[in-house]
Image (cartoon, coloured by chain):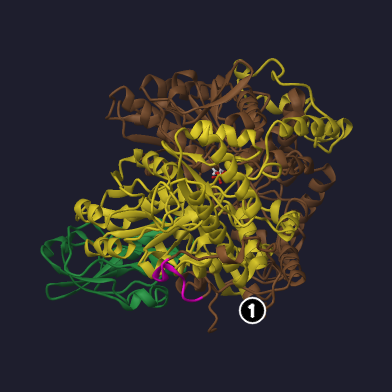
Chain colours: A brown, B green, C yellow
Amino acid sequence: MSKLSFEKSVAGASAFSLPRCDIPPEAVTVEIPQNFLREEDPLLPELSEVEVVRHFTELSGRAYGVDNGFYPLGSCTMKYNPKINEWAARLPGFANIHPLQPQDTVQGALQLMYELEEMLCEITGMDSFSLQPAAGAHGEMTGAMIIKAYHNSRQDYKRKKMIVPDSSHGTNPATANMLGFEIVQVKSDERGLVDLADLRSLVNDEIAGLMLTNPNTLGLFEEDIQQIAEIIHAAGGLLYYDGANANAIMGITRPGDMGFDICHLNLHKTFGTPHGGGGPGSGPVGVKSFLADFLPVPVIEKQGSKYILNYNRPLSIGKVHSFYGNFGVAVKAYTYIKALGKTGLKEACENAVLNANYLRTKLTDHYDIPYNRLCKHEFVASARKQKKESGVTALDVAKSLIDRGYHPPTIYFPLIVEEALMIEPTETETKERLDEFVEAMLAIDREARQSPDKIKAAPQQAVIRRVDEARAARRPVLKWSPEK
Amino acid sequence: MKVKADYYYSEEHEWVRVEGDLAYIGITDYAQHHLGNTVFVELPENESEFAAGEVIGVIESVKAVADMHTPVSGTVTAINEELEDSPELLNEDPYGHYIAVLKMTNPEELKALMNSEQYAAFCEQQEE
Amino acid sequence: MNYVPNPPWVVQQMLESMGLASVEDLFRDIPEELKLKRELNLAAPLAELELRRELSALAAKNLNVDTYPCFLGAGAYDHYIPAVVEQMLLRSEFYTAYTPYQPEISQGILQAIFEYQTMICNLTGMDVANASVYDGGSALAEACSLACDVTRRKKILVPETVNPRYSEVVRTYALGEKMEVIPVSCQEGVVDAGAIAALIDDQTAAVVIQHPNFYGNLEVELEKIGQAIHAHKSLLVMAVDPISLGILKPPAAWGADIVVGEGQSLGNSLSFGGPYLGFFATTQKLMRKIPGRLVGETVDLDGKRAFVLTLQAREQHIRRERASSNICSNEALCALAATIYLTVVGKQGIKAVAKRCHQLACYAKQQFVKAGFKLKYNQPFFKEFAVAVNDPQAANAALLQAGIIGGYELNDALLFAFTEKRTCAEIDRLVAALGGMERE
Ligand SMILES: Cc1ncc(COP(=O)(O)O)c(C=O)c1O
């Protein structure tokens, strides 16, 4: 068991010292009224430097990243994170600049942001971008705000409904709700695509828009996207592109050409920036020109050879972030796009789709794949056959994969597939890795039939066994307390 | 799947046990089974009024969340505070633990509910 | 440079195994007319060495705070980041991982978040802290939205002494019409308890108090303000500087219901405004309504202590449109930086850093006053204060000429921040340079 830093604490130990104080002794004062001062020191651990380093090194040994192995976590695009990007973001000229410095002193940063926006416009077919949103869901929110602001600007106040597919990611309906939209769910048809008849029956003059991922969360390209766009536009709504799956189309087709009016991209998925164990991400939002005025302030503009931040945008929705978004992440994505260039992005996409279809084909005879046809960057298999035959569920398969050295796929999402195993290999995996993974999946299938209890008892090789989640949620312990 | 005789049942898998003009309301064995480990129950406020079909509480499990509707109209006269500390009771004995007691304003509404046999058949149908 | 590992002959082999002739076949489900029938209009791929050159050149166009001393604050601070923080963050088991959905292979990350939650609780005095939200501004917006949700009221009072960037973010979030932002004007650089009492009513969900406030001042009427708020069963939402909590009374002691803030100061670089760290803490009572990820302690099948994401029924992936927040990815790595930072500085260090910032600010005030300057406000402050100048923009330009990154420009003043990285010598230079300019 790994002790908490608090439990390793030794009174008086320290890993820190301040520089000598050069304030003349007679000038050293504390001018804070007594009743504003803390009475007790905040309880923080006290450790020597070597112990701090060992503590976090130990914790890192109990974590698993893309650098540790295959990470086919569907919808998350766990591709390799190039090391040069880490170097770039840590350059003092990027890492150590204050967001409110005079604009003349940060021309390199503004130029990078401006150029990144231009590149994202080209990749998506949009006309303007803002880098302000800090993650995918934040981008969705910014997009939903723009939709609202657009309808409001036309005094079209009755548009209170947002359509999302039943296969959509939870952030789509949650976002629309935050903006006060009523959520209308459109069904998926037997192909796993938006049911056009259902969609037609849902649209009217109260529809604000449709939020759609393409390829969708089943990894399938929405082939009727042009008709979908027509239906939504004819009803006066806007079409929003959730770019979580853009790795499947970049360089091949563009949301802007499909008829989408607004889109976000996840730089932390498609453009190779690391997920950091849950962030930071970056969710830039792009729009067609007729919506550009609504983008968050400030926008970066180029005047002659100079870049400026323009706050004077009366129609803007306002700010969604204290400053300009996750600049450090933008530096990494910029470096990535520059590395891959005009040919590399498409190659990345092609190989992501190739790897997904390769895995899908290899697993077809052993796992149920409800929508089994050409997929894009990911596909959704199901453990329902295993569950019926031997009681082994998607969760059990996931845990058994841990024992075999893999990070499991996304499970139980999308909600429209029972016992879902959502598998996204990404382009940065070799055929050998994929073959090994297939072997592992087949072995699990075999073992499920022969000795299901073994799979149900997995993992056995990890630092802990399965956890009691009900206990955690019933009587939550969310911080360490010394009296324990 | 257990079903209790003499209880009334709704299609949303709530049960009603009647004592005079009081309706004890809870969730069925089918409901708890499908929700999985219940981890939290949000109870209504005492003395609040509800019409049949309205949401009177929320039940959270590890991986799901479900609204609890009242099958009958009335005023809340008691809530089961025991569930606040021990939500698992709904898994252990769903028919033994009511969520709220309502003083019914329209007992006629009971007629629209299922009896235990009808409910057992209804559940079977749902499973198909 | 490309990171695709399969050479073309392997690609061909894979295609053949699926009965496909070419890569194009993989995209035949996309309508022809939608396909981009040209190369993307981007530059040619660059080799790593070329990337180094290009990126170095771009970075070199920026003036960084290592070259010029920085007296800018206003929501982002040039605090020292110990080498241990930078080194540990480079461990790729941390930074190349996703959100710890699978607890068995994510104990290290889950435990670090649990330690982070504990630290934020201990600094603020609150019961519960989440695993982070995007930044200070969005943390405040989430707090206001939570306040409206739990009180079933709509009005949020936001005084002028709150960081204007934060209030702007709150106003943007209010586009959803679930909250109504009511500005409160302030004299003397602090919130007047009377003004709050006059505006607050039974429709007020919360009052936001930033303390120390945007102008660096302590909100001297905090106690009375808190009483007025709670008398109306509204919530006190506080935005705080985590470094200040090394010496300042924790927000819980003022009766705060929700505490948020910008955690950048804790081991995260300035990085031109992001990625930063929104921290979010609240009371036991509001625990099940808190937005974002939470890590809880439990046991595994063998009874061993284990950590796991918990209370997930609050979140978008389960509650969907009924979730009170849509947040999914947060700022986990920035929270890890904060955790490592707070472990390095420890109990004594956080106090020492806070004290040093304040003492340097006090020294600076003395020097400014000696040089004939007036402070814009006559209030107790922590590490920032505003100095009255005739032309802030010109003054800043002159400071830059003198090799100093100046303050934040207010209408008639410059707001200066003093971190432990500043020295008396630098402060003397600042005062002298500004003095020289103002006398001209
Ligand atoms: C389809 C989809 N939409 C939205 C999101 C939310 O993105 P983020 O976590 O960056 O907020 C995700 C992330 O998993 C996703 O897969």
Asked whether A330 or B72 is in front, the reply is A330
What's the magenta region? A33-40
Name the spot of residue C65 as percent of width and height, x first: 66, 43
Does residue A354 appear to the left or right of A276 in the view shown?
A: right
Q: Quadrant of ligand 1?
A: top right
Asked whether A362 or A249 is in front, the reply is A249
Disc 1: which residue: A7
Figure quadrant of residue A455: bottom right
Q: Residue at x 72, y 55 (%)?
A: C86
Residue C62 visible at all: yes
Name the spot of residue C332 as percent of width and height, x first: 60, 54
Q: What chain is tagged by disc 1?
A: A
Figure quadrant of residue C228: bottom left
Asked whether C371 or A173 is in front, the reply is C371
Does residue C397 appear to the left or right of A426 in the view shown?
A: left
Rendered view: C389 above or below A252: below
Hey, what amino acid is under mark 1? Glu
Name the spot of residue A38 as percent of width and height, x first: 47, 71
Is A35 inside the magenta-drawn segment? Answer: yes
Residue C274 visible at all: no
> Helix, strand or loop at disc 1?
helix
Magenta part, dominant SS: loop
Rendered view: A151 above or below C78: above
Name the spot of residue C12 as percent of width and height, x first: 84, 30
Q: Quadrant of the N terminus of chain A?
A: bottom right
Asked whether A309 or B83 is in front, the reply is A309
